Structure formats: C-alpha cells, structure tokens
Amino acid sequence: MLLVEDDRATYSALRGILSLRGWDVRVATSVAEARTELSESIDAVILDLMLPDGGGEGLLPEIRAQFPLIPVAVTTGISDGTRIEAVEQMGATALLRKPITLGELLKVIGPVSR
Amino acid sequence: MGKDVFWITVTVVLDLTVATGYILIAGHWLKNQKSLRNPRAKRAMGRMKNIFIFCGLCGYIFIPIKMFWPAWRLYDLFMCVLVYFTWRYALDTRGLRVVYNELNLSEELAEDLVRSQEEARRKSYFLNAVNHDLRTPLNGLSLQVDLAAATLQQGDATSATKALVDARRSIDATVQLLNGFLEVARLDWAHDQVSPSIFGVRDAVARAAFRFEADVQAKGLTLTVSGGESLVIESDRIKLERLVSNLVANAVKFTPSGGILVDVRIEKMGVVVEVADSGIGISPTHQAELFHELFQAHNVARDRNFGVGLGLAISRRLAKQLDGELTVSSELGKGSRFRISLPNARIVRLPSEGAKHDVRVTAENKESNRGGDAPPIAAG
C-alpha cells in the first residue's frame, strides 16, 4: 500500500490504522518520493492532491500505466470543481473528501490481499 | 450696384450663420473630446473635427473668389444647404452628448467589471484555502481518533495516547486558524480601538524582534536591531509590537541562512521601521498578492508548518490602524524588505545621533546585550 500524503497527523494515523488491519504501508510525502516508491509492487494507493512539489493528480497516469487494476483512493480538501472532475476522469477509483471516514476508505481499498 | 449690395448682404448673413453653427459644433467637440475616456472614440472625434475644420476653411477661401465672380444666386443656394446641414448638426450635438455619456459609462462599467472579477477570483481563492485549511486538520483529527479507538481495542494504551496527542495538535492547528480569522475580522471592524501612548520605539521594536531569539539561534541566523536610539513617539505600542513581531516571524521562517536586520529611522515622511532579511525572497507576481488573506507565496501544498497565511493580511491591517503603511520590496533568492512607515505618529523626542549601537543575536553569541539599550520610557 502506498500512502501519498504530506500532512503528518493524517499519514501517521492512516499508517497506524492500516497497519493494524494488516497492510504494509509505505508513506511518500511528495510527488518525487511517490515516483521512487512506484518502482515496487503496490496493492493499493491513497493519494492526496495538494503536495509540496505539485498536484498529486500528476501521478495518476503513471500509477495507472503500471498498475491498471489496483484501487486508487484520492483524498482531497480542495473544493475546485474543475480540478475534481479532471481527477475523476484520470482513473481514480474514488474521490474522498476530507475529512474522510475510515469506513468509506476501507470500502475503496478493500481487504488486504494475501 | 444696388442689386450687388443686396446679394452681398444675403451672402454675408448666410456666411455668419454657418460660422456660428461651426463655433457651436467646435465648442461641443472641444468639451466632449476632453471628457471622453475611451481612447478609440477620442481619436475618432479628433479626426472628425479635423475634417470639419478643413471644410470650413475651404469655404472661407472661396469668399475672395466670390468678389471677382459674383454668381451670387448659385453661391447662396449652396450656402443655404450648408446652413441647413450645419445647424442641424449643431442642434444634433445635444443628442450626441447622450451617446458620449453612454460611452463613458460603459467604459467605467468595463473597469468595474475587471475590478469585481479580480475581487471574485480572490474571494474564491480565499474560500478554497479556508476550505482546505479547515478540512486538513479535521481529517488528521478524525483519523487520529479512529487510530486511538483501534489501538485501545487492542489494549495498546501507549499508541492510543500518542494518537490522542497528535489529535490535540490537530485541534490546536484548527484553533490557531480560527483565531487568525477572528483577528482579521476584528481588525476590519471599525470599532477596534487604537490606544496611543508615548514610548521608545527602539525598545518596543527590540522587544518584539527578540521574541524570536530562540528560533533565530536554532536556525543559525543573526538578528540585529539598529537605529532609533532614544526616539520617542506617540502611537499604539501593542499594535506596533505585534506588527514588528509578525514581520520578524515571517523573516525567520523564510530565511534559511544569513540574517535579519530590523532598522528604525526617521525619514522625511516620519518614523520608518524596516525588517530586512537575506531569505528566499518573493517574486514580483507574488508580491501583489502577498497581503491578501490566506495567500502563501511558497506554500502550494498549504503545509501548516509555514503558518496559515494570515500574518501579512493582519500586519497590513495593523499598519492601517496605526495610520501608516506596510510595503514590501523583494527579489527572488536575495531576500525581502518589509517597511512600516508611520507618517502620522507624533515624534516626542528625536533619536540621539551620537549614541549609536546595534543589538545583535547570533547562533554563537547567546548573550545579547539588549538589556542595556534604549531605556524604556514610561507609557503615558
């Protein structure tokens, strides 16, 4: 599981919760870090849109090129309608508005596949 | 001969009638061309006027010819037509005034539209930023609470406590943001009182600046306060201190190496306090937006570690309340210079020229000598 998120409180909590559920969570806090993480195999991605070195949506085509079938949950606090529409068309499995609830996130990423 | 006198009289009368019509039209043109704001309409008017003047002049050139070739009836027929058209046009100019007014009005409306579009763009930026800045800590908070619950269920109290501490931090961040909004709103509220007192500027500025001593030392920077020894003014001390500390806080945040200089001096227009740093600087496009609420030049991700983006909006309001101005000059990569000018602060005592000494904090020099400088003047 790749978690791309720059807010410390958010990623530390998500890492904790998902680890408890059996996920092996790798955290990337920027687009550049996420790119290096993409070289290894991933079962699911949680992607934030506002990252320090650019928009997270820039990663979507790369993720889809490498892993066409895995669930990608995009989380966002932004309310820019056109940007959100663009993200939905770029292959995100679901778009979750912050504050996200654990239930909806787990519905998108599903159980750990072993 | 008697017949000639009759025709000459008729022609002169007609000529004079045309000339008065011309004068009326010319007066109207002169007046309206000046008040026209649309440059294209103004140019067109100018050209029309030139054609008219040319035609008029041509008409008058023919007067001496008439003297030698007295075909009066023919001339006067033409003159009658000219009188008719000239006066019709001269009377029509009244109606044209309405057109010109409309033209000016639409020009004003176009300017208003540009202004309100800019305002709308800024408002939507502000709302998006508020939305994001409130949702992000709430998101962290909600997930930390989920984590605490999950770890408690497993009997892991240590992890739960850690999650709750993080949750507390998210709450603090949200409260900080809300407090910022509250402060902006309060400063916008006209009844927020300014309470003037008489105080030493150097002392106030140094006190505000050295609040960040620890941060300056931690980053290995230098912080120098210079000028304004024994300068005493009448202004709102608390607001000035707040303003200076906002600027110094920003300078510390955006200066990776080098130093920050806070300078107090008297200029032609009055008291000036300048906060200059050797930091990352601000590009010209960002400088225009800098004082708007929630705008952050170097923080596209809106990382809360860089603050919430209200500091300069608050600072500019504070400067306005002090009857002064806050401006910035900066170059990307070379640092920024924020300048508070207080032209309306009453100067009670001018700074002494002789006793000039700076107070300085550096990473190595932890004992600053600020205790001895600029004795505080009792507030009135």
Image: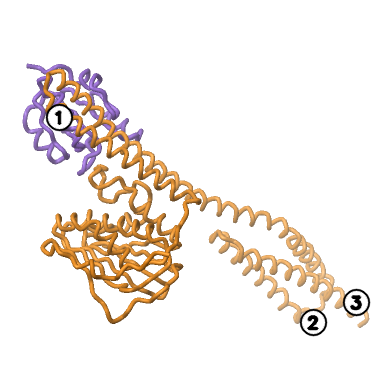
Residue at image x 13%, y 25%?
B157
Tag 2 residue? B67
Subunit bearing disc 2: B
Q: Amino acid at mark 2?
A: Met
Query: Residue B175: image x %, image y %?
Result: 32, 39
Tag 3 residue? B6
Task: For mark 1, give the secondary structure.
Answer: helix
Query: Residue B224: image x %, image y %?
Result: 22, 66
Q: Is residue B329 visible?
A: no
**Toward which corner of the image does residue B273 lie, by quadrant?**
bottom left
Q: Which mark is residue A65?
A: 1
Q: Amino acid at mark 1?
A: Ala
Q: Is residue A14 left or right of residue B373?
A: left
Query: What's the CA distance linking mark 2 and mark 3?
Result: 14 Å
Marks 2, 3 in one chain = yes
**Frontmost residue, B104 versus B371:** B371
